[in-house]
Image (spheres, rainbow, N blue to C red):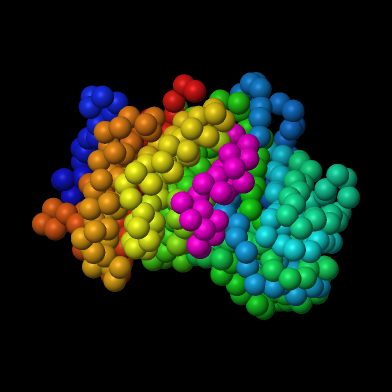
């Protein structure tokens, strides 16, 4: 692994940027805990222990506060969802804070959908919640809300402090659902469904229908110091976590999230995974093209200071005639729009895929040209060279077997961790 210790990439005008350092082992995440243990291993707790009550108007450090996204997933069109059904959605927070809010989306629905009740709790195990942790969410002071086709809604703030790196559970009772639903198809995390209204329950007995998708929920935010921000990862299946271990939060943004929490003095703490398996920069396919979903999935979220772009391999390997110039034009649009919104933009090189069934010399030539532009154009504020991190020194068009999940396109858990460890945390912040 010595070749991963110090890797360097060029900045504007060919000047050398800071080295990208790969850390040999992850450090244990540090978070501000609830007064009870967090996540799935947490035992029974009283309501006061499960949610540490805090004054929402005052930051513990005495500073000003703002809203920052702590979890997000990109929405897409899903199959029809039945009415009169409950959904228990398990998500992993990144940054901690107070006054939790959730965002529900009906972006891809063609009928209104009613959320008759919604609750936020903490996972004990499976569909079972920590005792006393399940608390009602409201919308404009009301316990239910109807969202029009194409619309979104933000819940009212929920008083109390939520820890970083918590297994948060959002339970929804949905009525009046017709036609396609909106959600994230490949969660790499088991959530649960049940017939009827069981959102308020903390026991698991009625939650007998496991699901590998998240429905309607696409963001969770908290209030924290204005010095704290989040990074949004715009990507495809590699960012979405394909081939990583389900239930274990081993996507590369998850590994990076743990590093961010553990890093003293680092102000980028929140993580938004805006990856969709099969996604492209330029064309709709699996999900809307990155150019079409950028505003909804990234720029609309509160507290995002940095956009991290790892996309392009699906455009290249699809054999649709996409050229280097085509992808460069797409990247420039993403950069310009993010800069206009006041965000830093980090670009990552496209990773090798020799051995994947769509690989050919023409696609490889485009990948090499795109990577040369990413490394040397200076268009991105910072560059992370994932190609150099994961490629084989003996066959640079292919992934190192130690990192290969077996399909020659997607990294395994070790590859995901190597990607996260190779990111110099300082590249995630700039002075825009």
Answer whether residue 97 is visible to the viewer in this image. no
Q: Furthest residue to the left?
A: 394
Q: In the picture provided, is 153 more to the left or to the right than 331? A: right
Residue 334 located within the stretch drawn in magenta: no
Which residue is located at x 75 percent, y 63 percent?
110
Q: In the picture provided, is 204 more to the left or to the right than 92? A: right
Answer whether residue 226 is visible to the viewer in this image. yes
The number of discs equals 0
Residue 297 located within the stretch drawn in magenta: yes
Which residue is located at x 79 percent, y 64 percent?
111
Quarter assignment of residue 381: top left
Quarter assignment of residue 416: bottom left
Quarter assignment of residue 173: bottom right
Which residue is located at x 36 percent, y 54 percent?
322
Residue 57: image location, x then y, percent: 74, 28
Q: Furthest residue to the right?
A: 142
Q: Is residue 411 above or below residue 229?
A: below
- Say which of 289 and 259 sits in front: 289
- Say which of 89 and 76 sits in front: 76
Residue 21: image location, x then y, percent: 27, 38
Which residue is located at x 73 percent, y 50 percent?
152
Q: Is residue 410 above or below residue 258?
A: below
Residues rendered magenta in the picture: 282-303
Residue 305: image location, x then y, percent: 52, 32
Q: In the picture provided, is 42 more to the left or to the right than 334? A: right
Q: Is residue 102 above or below residue 277?
A: above
Residue 364: image location, x then y, percent: 24, 56
- Say which of 344 and 303 sits in front: 344
């Amino acid at each position: 692994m010595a070749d991963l210790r110090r890797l360097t990439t060029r900045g504007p005008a060919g000047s050398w940027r800071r080295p990208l350092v790969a850390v040999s082992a992850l450090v244990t995440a540090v978070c501000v805990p609830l007064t009870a243990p967090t996540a799935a291993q947490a035992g029974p707790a009283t309501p006061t222990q499960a949610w540490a009550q805090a004054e929402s108007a005052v930051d513990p450090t005495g500073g000003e506060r703002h809203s920052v996204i702590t979890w997000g997933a990109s929405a897409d069109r899903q199959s029809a969802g039945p009415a009169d059904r409950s959904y228990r959605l398990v998500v992993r927070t990144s940054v901690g804070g107070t006054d939790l809010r959730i965002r529900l989306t009906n972006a891809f629905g063609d009928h209104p959908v009613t959320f008759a009740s919604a609750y936020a709790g903490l996972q004990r195990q499976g569909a079972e919640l920590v005792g006393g942790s399940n608390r009602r969410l409201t919308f404009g002071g009301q316990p239910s809300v109807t969202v029009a086709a194409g619309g979104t809604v933000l819940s009212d703030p929920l008083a109390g402090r939520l820890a970083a790196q918590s297994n948060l559970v959002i339970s929804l009772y949905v009525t009046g659902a017709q036609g396609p639903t909106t959600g994230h198809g490949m969660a790499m995390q088991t959530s649960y469904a049940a017939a009827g209204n069981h959102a308020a329950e903390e026991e698991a007995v009625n939650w007998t229908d496991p699901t590998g998708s998240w429905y309607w929920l696409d963001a969770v935010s908290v209030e924290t110091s204005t010095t704290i921000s989040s990074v949004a990862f715009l990507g495809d299946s590699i960012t979405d976590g394909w081939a990583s271990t389900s239930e274990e939060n081993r996507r590369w943004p998850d590994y990076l999230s743990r590093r961010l929490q553990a890093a003293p003095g680092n102000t980028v703490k929140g993580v938004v995974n805006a990856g969709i398996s099969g996604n492209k920069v330029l064309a709709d396919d699996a999900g809307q093209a990155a150019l079409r979903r950028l505003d909804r999935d990234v720029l609309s979220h509160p507290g995002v200071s940095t956009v991290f772009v790892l996309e392009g391999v699906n455009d290249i390997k699809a054999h649709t005639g996409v050229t280097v110039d085509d992808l460069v034009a797409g990247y420039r649009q993403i950069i310009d729009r993010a800069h206009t919104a006041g965000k830093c933009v980090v670009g990552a090189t496209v990773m090798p895929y020799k051995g994947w069934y769509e690989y050919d010399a023409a696609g490889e030539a485009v990948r090499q040209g795109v990577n040369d532009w990413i490394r040397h154009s200076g268009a991105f504020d910072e560059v992370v060279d994932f190609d150099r991190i994961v490629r084989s020194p003996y066959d640079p068009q292919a992934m190192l077997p130690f990192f290969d999940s077996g399909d020659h396109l997607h990294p395994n858990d070790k590859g995901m961790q190597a990607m996260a460890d190779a990111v110099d945390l300082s590249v995630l912040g700039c002075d825009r």
